[in-house]
């Protein structure tokens, strides 16, 4: 019961974040972030799909971007956690986090920092989180 309530709160908080801020500030790139191999419109995935994805990728019609880092928020029977990842490829901590999730739980990728491949120094943080709900 507590886990269901906690997942609901996390989900509502993530929706609130989306509602309060514009998806893209004026200077942010127009991009879509997904897990590799998962369709842009699909927000319900299995643990196996996420593990197989192995990384986050950027979709943009205008420019080419690379992901520099991201944070992950998730909860399981042991509590609620936030983990950091310093590349686009999932590190062992992120893979372990995905493995710890059960059906119905949510994992949120946020604070996603991207850089245009041709630009030397400018990085941008994508304000829209990537949210996946785990299905069987």
Image: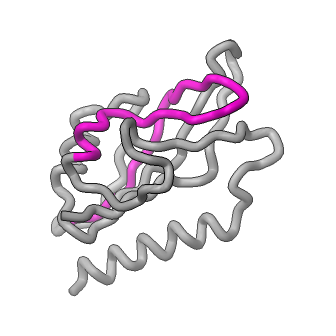
Task: Give the residues in magenta.
Answer: 49-76
Q: Tell me where residue 96 sits by quadrant.
A: top left
Please indicate, yes or no, whether residue 84 appears anywhere in the rendered image.
no
Q: Tell me where residue 5 sits by quadrant.
A: bottom left
Screen quadrant of the N terminus: bottom left
User: Furthest residue to the bottom?
Assistant: 1
Q: Is residue 62 left or right of residue 67?
A: right
Residue 52: in magenta span:
yes
Determine whether 107 is above or below 24 in the image: below
**Nearer-the-camera pick, 86 or 48:** 48
Residue plotted at (24% across, 64% down): 135
Percent coordinates x, y for residue 113 in the rendering: 57, 35
Residue plotted at (64% across, 34% down): 60
Please indicate, yes or no, whether residue 10 appears anywhere in the rendered image.
yes
User: Furthest residue to the right?
Assistant: 26
**Nearer-the-camera pick, 44 or 130:** 44
């Amino acid at each position: 019961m507590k886990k269901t309530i906690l997942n609901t709160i996390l989900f509502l908080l993530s929706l609130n974040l989306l509602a309060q801020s514009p998806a893209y500030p004026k200077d942010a790139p127009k991009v879509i972030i997904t897990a590799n191999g998962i369709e842009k419109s699909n927000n319900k995935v299995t643990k196996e799909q996420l593990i197989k994805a192995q990384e986050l990728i950027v979709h943009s019609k205008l420019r080419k971007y690379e992901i520099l880092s991201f944070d992950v928020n998730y909860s399981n029977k042991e509590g609620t956690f936030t983990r950091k990842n310093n590349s686009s490829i999932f590190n062992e901590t992120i893979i372990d986090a995905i493995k710890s999730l059960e059906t119905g739980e949510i994992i949120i990728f946020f604070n996603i920092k991207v850089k245009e491949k041709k630009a030397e120094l400018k990085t941008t943080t994508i304000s829209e989180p990537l949210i996946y709900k785990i299905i069987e």
